[in-house]
Amino acid sequence: MTDFKKKSVKDLEKIVREKRDELRSFRFKSAGSRTRNVREGRNTRREIAQILTELNHRNKVAN
């Protein structure tokens, strides 16, 4: 896990977009056939949630 608290808001938003694209491609891959690494989707969703939590925390502190 990378430390998201050290990254800027723009970097975090970019990472969220990349992770969402990664999750979308994982879902399409798994729809066609069985995937060997089923934890990949879970880990990607977890990282997205962690980044969004950090972004929400920063927005609340700023306001």
Image (spheres, rainbow, N blue to C red):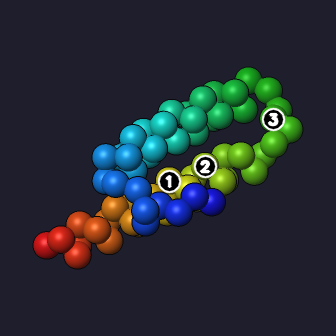
Seen from the viewer's position, the closer of residues 36 and 10 is 10
The residue singled out by tag 3 in the image is: 35
Instruction: Check the image and name the residue furthest to the left.
Output: 63
Q: Earlier in the sequence, mark 3 or mark 2?
A: 3
Number of the label disc, if any, that sits on residue 10: none
Separation of marks 3 and 1 at Cα, in angstroms? 21 Å
Task: Tell me: 47 left or right of 6.
Answer: right
Task: Tell me: 49 left or right of 57.
Answer: right
The residue singled out by tag 1 in the image is: 48
Q: Position of residue 1 (x, y in %)?
A: 63, 60
Quadrant assignment, res 17: top left
Residue 20 visible, this orientation: no
Q: Position of residue 28 (x, y in %)?
A: 63, 28
Residue 10 visible, this orientation: yes
Query: Callout 2 environment at 10 Å: few (<14), some (14 to 19), or many (20+)?
Result: some
**Where's the C terminus, which quadrant?**
bottom left
Q: Please tell me whether residue 50 is drawn above or below residue 27 in the rendered image.
A: below
Query: Callout 1 environment at 10 Å: few (<14), some (14 to 19), or many (20+)?
Result: many
Instruction: Check the image and name the residue furthest to the front.
Output: 6
Seen from the viewer's position, the closer of residues 52 and 9 is 9
Q: Which of marks 3 and 1 is nearer the N terminus?
A: 3
The residue singled out by tag 2 in the image is: 44
